[in-house]
Image (tube, rainbow, N blue to C red):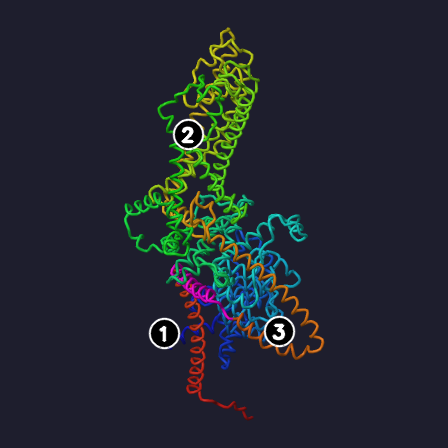
Amino acid sequence: MSMKGRGSKHQKRVSFSEDEDEQCWKEENGGVDAHHLKSVETVSDSSGYYRHNTKSLDTFPHRRMTLPREKGRRQAIRGPAFMFNDRGSSLTAEEERFLDAAEYGNIPVVRKMLEESPTLNVNCVDYMGQNGLQLAVGNEHLEVTELLLRRDNLARVGDALLLAISKGYVRIVEALLGHPSFASGERLTRSPCELQDDDFYSYDEDGTRFSPDITPIILAAHCQKYEVVHMLLMKGAKIERPHDYFCKCADCTEKQRKDSFSHSRSRINAYRGLASPAYLSLSSEDPVLTALELSNELVKLANIEKEFKDKKNRNKETSQHNGFFLNDYRKLSMQCKDFVVGVLDLCRDTEEVEAILNGDISAELEEGQHHRSLLSRVKLAIKYEVKKFVAHPNCQQQLLTIWYENLSGLREQTTAVKCLVVLVVALGLPLLAVGYWFAPCSKLGKILRSPFMKFVAHAASFIIFLCLLVFNASDRFEGITTLPNVTVTDYPLQIFRVKTTQFSWTEILIMIWVAGMMWSECKELWTEGPREYVMQLWNLLDFGMLSIFIAAFTARFFAFLQAMKAQKYVDEKIDAPDLSMVMLPPDIKYFTYARDKWVPSDPQLISEGLYAIAVVLSFSRIAYILPANESFGPLQISLGRTVKDIFKFMVLFIMVFLAFMIGMFILYSYYLGAKVNPAFTTVEESFKTLFWSIFGLSEVSSVVLKYDHKFIENIGYVLFGIYNVTMVVVLLNMLIAMINSSYQEIEDDADVEWKFARSKLWLSYFDNGKTLPPPFSIVPSPKSFYLCMKRLINLLRCRRHHLKKDVELGMDNSKSRLNLFPQSSMRMPDSHSFNSILNQPTRYQQIMKRLIKRYVLKAQVDKENDEVNEGELKEIKQDISSLRYELLEEKSQATEELSLLIQKLSDKLNPTTCPSTPSH
């Protein structure tokens, strides 16, 4: 713009009259309001023109000065915002100009008003309840914020801090944290609802947008502001873990009684902060362990507080805006699990992967444990079902390396070669067991201790056990030779039951296998503890199967003892050549009867029934080893999920089945013998008819009566039809849909599910022990005797050491009275050096610090990439605002120069004439 143009415009502005419209003023001054032009005085007030200009501006009435304010900030008074009218109209013109300057970042005006206006109320608020500090912070005006922070008795500093944290203005947060009110650190740890004794926060819910239970550190964690979280942690802030959900302390009881909703909201807000990756990575010495434990705690809370469960079909857009109800406990648990996976994904070498999977292993290795036997984080992830962590390629690669330990060449072999190894191990298992008994530390022992060989040995042993079960029944494949009503004995005086209850050699081998497996289960129960043992369903299946086998053999042995007792009576008391020629007592004669005359509670019959159930469970145990194969693993997982669905479905099924079974029985119980068939006349018949009706094996004539009782018969038709429609059409199709849904879930994430199940299988063979499978594990090896003696000696040494230490401690206490100070001064360097060693970070801590740095940097880069458009718009907005006031400042300087030039020109054109008085 030329000087001439500028001058013409300013001349017009100087000649403005009071009656002209304000809009003309803005048009002639480039859209600048009157109160903005008045701020020129604060930039440079050295010329008379400025004084003249501002003086002319002051001639505007008070209403005219607040007109732009009414058109701008208070325009929202009209319409829905009429409720704010009272608060907005109470502002004076000075306060209006102050809030405008703070909002638009007009530093000169703010500085001048703070310095020269003693009556200015810096804590005045606009119609939205925001003071100047909040307006400056909300528009990212750092210089204005610093000016206001120098003022004493500044209110709502806490609200301004929360606002700066929510918007991510790190430099403003740093400036606010330098305020004297944060010197003690108490205001950073306590929430606004706990600090209602001053004006640090606004408690009327008018000037703040945050919940009263939100502290700065919680808000920074919610917003994922890593720099802010770090600054607050350095200031001593932390997030207190909420009390247990069922806590009955005085504080929790009072909060629950006063406002249960606020109490639940404060709990979930606290957990949102604790589960934040920003807080997990910067506040914990072991973030992986903390995240795993927190994820399990959140899953438990999700099952307790079901009102905060997230629905799968919620709108993503809604979930982003309503953070409280959609960021529920289960979603927070997934967030913790994703954090652990993210840290594992940043590992670059084997040492870092081992640190993540094993945790801090320095203490355990000092105790002599093997490095492979730890994997504490993997075990914890399996326990808490962090499937993505366990199925991660870094974790799987490490587990695969351990799986083929001492068998490096076997890993690259084909499936056929591995099957050949399994066959060789199965055939030579007795020889391998003998070799391991006498040389456990040899090369053969090291090979057998590898997890893969232990798995092969146990699988081979179980296959042999199943073969024994099949071979035990092979003599009856083509039918039995002795019919149920026939008795066959080896000699005339032999009791028939003695021959039927004798144990064959295959049954003796089965008993030995069962004893070995039960011994292994007992050791596992002792090692893991009852609670951990019961949590694994396969352990329950094994224990149930073995218990049924033991019960079956016990009943069989009891029947054998009774038969032998009867045989002993015959051998001692009977002299006849044949038992058919003698009258035997009833209790003895019973054991000579054929099978068709045995009572239902006969021990041998019970033994045979239990044995059949145990055999079925034994073959179902094959599913345990299926996850080792990539093809059969997902099928086994789907089968297990299907069984769970069936158990859930059985609740509804039994309810409907019992209703119709009892109803049909009550309807037809009076017609016993008066029906076409006995269906529904007894409870047993009602059960059979309705059960087989599901499979289409019941007839419609089941409801027909021989009498002409049409009303009863029609009701029977209706109930029986409703039952078939409900069970076959509705419930069975519902079960099919449930099974299909479960299978589809497994299929959608089949790789993760299979690797997780395979890892559980692998991990059971990683621990020390269980080298020899049943039944060879029953026989104690020389290594077991050696370890037992070693533990006994160590126990005796520990007791002697404690006794010796107690004696020395007593002597030291007696000497301390005579030589206290020299002794303490002599021990001081030792304790000092010990503390210095303790303060040094361990190798695990160094690795975790390195990984967390990578995670934080990656999170910041990802966030910058996600918010690049929004960040650019904010930057453009701030540049425009800064340019606006720079132009105003340049305009004021140009106006001053123009005023001087006009003054000089007028002096030259009109020579100074001294006023002369006329002479008379």
In the image, taking residue 432 as reference, residue 289 lies left or right, namely: right
Mark in front: 2 vs 3: 2
The residue that mark 3 highlights is 118
Question: Which of these two is toward me, 799 or 130?
Answer: 799
Q: Which mark is residue 1?
A: 1
Secondary structure beneath dot 1 equals loop
Residue type beneath disc 1? Met
Q: Earlier in the sequence, mark 2 or mark 3?
A: 3
The residue that mark 2 highlights is 733
Q: Which residues are magenta?
A: 840-868
Residue type beneath disc 2? Asn
Question: Which of these two is toward me, 136 or 209?
Answer: 209
Query: How many dots with numbers?
Result: 3
Secondary structure beneath dot 3 equals loop
Q: Earlier in the sequence, mark 1 or mark 3?
A: 1
Residue type beneath disc 3? Pro
Main SS of the magenta part reads helix
Task: Specify the quadrant that holds the C terminus.
Answer: bottom right
